Image: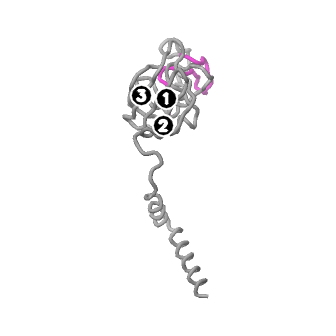
Amino acid sequence: MANRLATFFSLALLGALLSSCGTYHTVTDLVTSHVPERHAGRASIVVDLGEQQAYLYRGKNRTASSRISSGREGHRTPIGHFQVIRKDEGHRSSLYGNYVDDSGRVVKGNVDSRRDPRPPHSHFVGASMPFFVEFSPGYGLHQGYLPGVPASHGCIRLPYWKARQFYEAAHIGTAVVVRP
């Protein structure tokens, strides 16, 4: 009987502790603070244009990889060593997109705002580039269409979940290497 009573009071105390938001966070923090980080080290990104693959590293450990679509002929992705200079979760292109009317209907699609004249009664709406991680002015990684070949205007497109994963891991200053 004493054992059952002790068990009941222990469970009641645990329930009381876990039902309080402040206490719950403290308990969670205590539990997770002693768990070593699975992949320690600074994040870095390596893009292999020949393989059409991007790799995310933590220290020397590869933590993720993704298929990509890089810049097509005439719009090549720059090669070299870079650092993340800006992040924008809801980025839109300032150059490529559509001319739309006031109701949002596309009047002229897939335009380059520098070259294609704006039709009357329309305005420019830049192409959506979610989870934009800029590593060189005008170039970055972001979510986008992957046809299986280089097809972008120079950026590196990734599938939604991978773009989000790379975005969350990268910080301003994260190393990015783009190799041929």
**Mark 2 Cα-neighbour bin, 10 Å: few <14, some 14–19, many ≥20:** many
Closer to us: 25 or 123: 25
Dots 3, 2 in contact, CB < 8 A = no
Task: State how far apart marks 1 and 3 are (Cα).
Answer: 8 Å
| Residue that mark 2 sits on | 167
Q: Position of residue 3 (x, y in %)?
A: 58, 84
Locate residue 86 relative to residue 5 in the image: left or right.
Answer: left
**Mark 3, secondary structure of its residue:** strand
Task: State how far apart marks 1 and 2 are (Cα).
Answer: 8 Å
The numbered mark at residue 141 is 1
Q: Which mark is first along the chain, 2 or 3?
A: 3
Q: Position of residue 65 (x, y in %)?
A: 54, 34
**Mark 2, secondary structure of its residue:** helix
Task: State how far apart marks 3 and 2 are (Cα).
Answer: 12 Å
Q: Is residue 168 magenta?
A: no
Residue bounds of the magenta highlight: 89-111
Quadrant containing the N terminus in the rendered view: bottom right
Locate residue 58 relative to residue 5 in the image: left or right.
Answer: left
